[in-house]
Image (cartoon, rainbow, N blue to C red):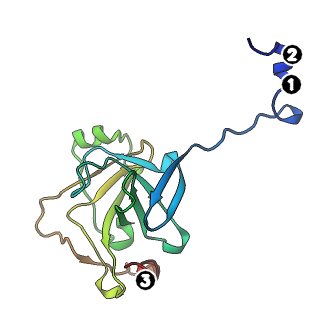
Amino acid sequence: MGLPEEEGARAGPAQGGAQPPAEVTVPVRSCRFGDLAVPAERVVRFIRPVVGFPDLEHYAVIEEAESAPVMWLQALGAPDVLLPVVDACLVTGNYSVELSDEEARELGLRRAEDARLLLVMTLDADPARITVNLRAPIVWNTRGAAAMQLVLQDSSLSVRHPVRPRRGEGRQEEVDRASADTP
């Protein structure tokens, strides 16, 4: 039995305005960040598992001001699986990958600008030892919340590419700062 229409019309905020919908969040437990409530649109499903983690499908993308431009992929249900990643464009300006039509379909990509290319990092207290893996980039469809890690067969690509700032960009200091407190 519902409210009479008149009474239902009065329910809600004063002055007839609609309340914005509450943000949907997902509870995430992380060994680095503790317990978090991550916006649902920041949870991605890996179409193909991340190398080394065949049973983990969903990850929260965590961006913290203190560690920018480094982002974190926190596996849901596995607090100890946390991968540091960085936008490829911040590391190397001439790096790109070609997706097959099938891969683009699997990701639900309709426009290239919806894809974000991430590189998995190896962090170190010594900034000179910070590297990224160019042979296994992650393609994230930022509109569809799907991602996949590619394993490229190009042997000229390094799995331990040193992180250096691109000419004219001072982002290396930010990467160094983000990794300074990483064990």
Q: Earlier in the sequence, mark 1 or mark 3?
A: 1
* Label 2 to label 3: alpha-carbon separation: 61 Å
Q: Which residue is mark 2?
A: 6
Quarter that holds the N terminus: top right
Check residue 159 in the rendering and tell me which mark sits there, or answer none. none
Q: In which quarter of the view is residue 89 placed? A: bottom left
Label 3 secondary element: loop
Q: Residue at x 25, y 46 (%)?
A: 48
Measured along the vertical axis of the image, is residue 86 above or below residue 113? below
Q: Residue at x 82, y 27 (%)?
A: 11
Callout 1 environment at 10 Å: few (<14), some (14 to 19), or many (20+)?
few
Q: Residue at x 32, y 53 (%)?
A: 139
* Label 2 to label 1: alpha-carbon separation: 7 Å
Q: Are marks 2 and 1 in contact (CB under 8 Å)?
A: yes
Measured along the vertical axis of the image, is residue 172 above or below residue 92? below
* 55 sits to left or right of 24: left
Callout 3 environment at 10 Å: few (<14), some (14 to 19), or many (20+)?
some
Q: Which residue is mark 1?
A: 10
Q: In which quarter of the view is residue 2 placed? A: top right
Measured along the vertical axis of the image, is residue 110 above or below residue 43? above
* Label 1 to label 3: alpha-carbon separation: 55 Å
As shown in the figure, which amino acid type bears the numbered disc 2?
Answer: Glu
As shown in the figure, which amino acid type bears the numbered disc 1?
Answer: Arg
Q: Which residue is mark 3?
A: 180
